[in-house]
């Protein structure tokens, strides 16, 4: 998980922003697999020691960007309420679809970059989605009346949303975003309503 920027020293935050901006520029120019730490530090105008004080390697730096952007573009757009309903779930699903579509539309399409970048992207997004769902499920105090813990529920729902959005965002010929979001919402809500009818209240 990334450190909340609200609690970070302004100088530290500035350095992280310089490094994040540098790697994103280099991602467009030469791809993830081709860039080096030296490339990143030169572009960010910081030294290697400063880089390693913040990130273990370029993978950790890229992971921080993905997670922070997910929180900005998906998590922060959800209603700040403990009450879940189909509208909230639709907003979440729509956010994940939009987020992955945006990333893939700007991603370098070389095979070497895909081989390194996509597994990292997939892991970070699925984990962030799982953490978000688990937190919300625990907040509303989900009780299914069956031996299915909140962790399992969050795991299944997060993979259902992420899996559909990930595959869809990589395809050329596909349903519209609205159609896919509706399909995923229907599948998930029907499962939830059978397991825990009280969870989704309109």
Image (cartoon, rainbow, N blue to C red):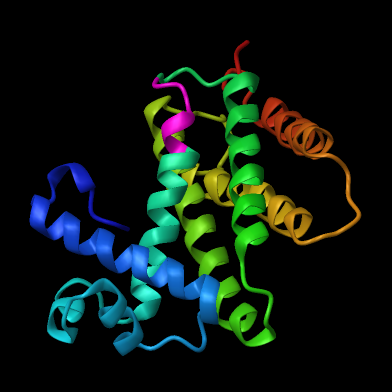
The quarter in which the N terminus is drawn is bottom left
Location of residue 161 with respect to 202 vertically, above or below = below
Q: Is residue 77 magenta?
A: yes
Location of residue 22 with respect to 48 vertically, above or below = above
Q: Residue at x 31, y 76 (%)?
A: 43
- The picture places residue 22, in percent across and down from the top left corner, at 35, 70
Q: Does the magenta stretch include residue 173?
A: no
Q: Residue at x 79, y 32 (%)?
A: 178
Taking the view exactly as shown, the residue that stands out farthest to the top is: 202
- The picture places residue 12, in percent across and down from the top left corner, at 12, 59
Q: Depth check: give the residue in front, 197 or 72.
A: 72
- The picture places residue 188, in percent across and down from the top left corner, at 71, 36
Q: Residue at x 45, y 59 (%)?
A: 66
Q: In this view, does 155 lie to the left or right of 197?
A: left
Q: Residue at x 46, y 33 (%)?
A: 137
Q: What stretch is highlighted in magenta?
A: 75-80
């Amino acid at each position: 998980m990334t450190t909340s920027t609200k609690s970070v020293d302004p100088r530290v935050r500035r350095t992280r922003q310089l490094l994040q901006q540098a790697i994103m520029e280099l991602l467009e120019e030469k791809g993830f697999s081709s860039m080096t730490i030296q490339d990143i530090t030169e572009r960010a105008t910081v030294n290697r020691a400063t880089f390693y004080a913040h990130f273990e390697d370029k993978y950790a730096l890229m992971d921080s960007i993905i997670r922070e952007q997910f929180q900005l573009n998906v998590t922060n757009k959800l209603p700040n309420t403990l009450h879940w309903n189909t509208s909230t779930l639709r907003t979440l699903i729509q956010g994940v679809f939009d987020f992955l579509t945006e990333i893939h539309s700007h991603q370098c399409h070389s095979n070497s970059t895909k081989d390194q970048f996509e597994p990292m992207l997939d892991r970070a997004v699925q984990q962030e989605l799982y953490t978000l769902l688990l937190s919300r499920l625990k907040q509303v105090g989900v009780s299914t009346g069956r031996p299915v813990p909140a962790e399992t529920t969050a795991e299944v729902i997060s993979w259902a949303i992420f899996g559909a959005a990930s595959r869809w965002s990589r395809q050329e010929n596909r349903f519209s975003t609205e159609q896919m979001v509706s399909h995923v919402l229907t599948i998930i809500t029907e499962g939830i309503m059978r397991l825990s009818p009280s969870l989704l209240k309109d």
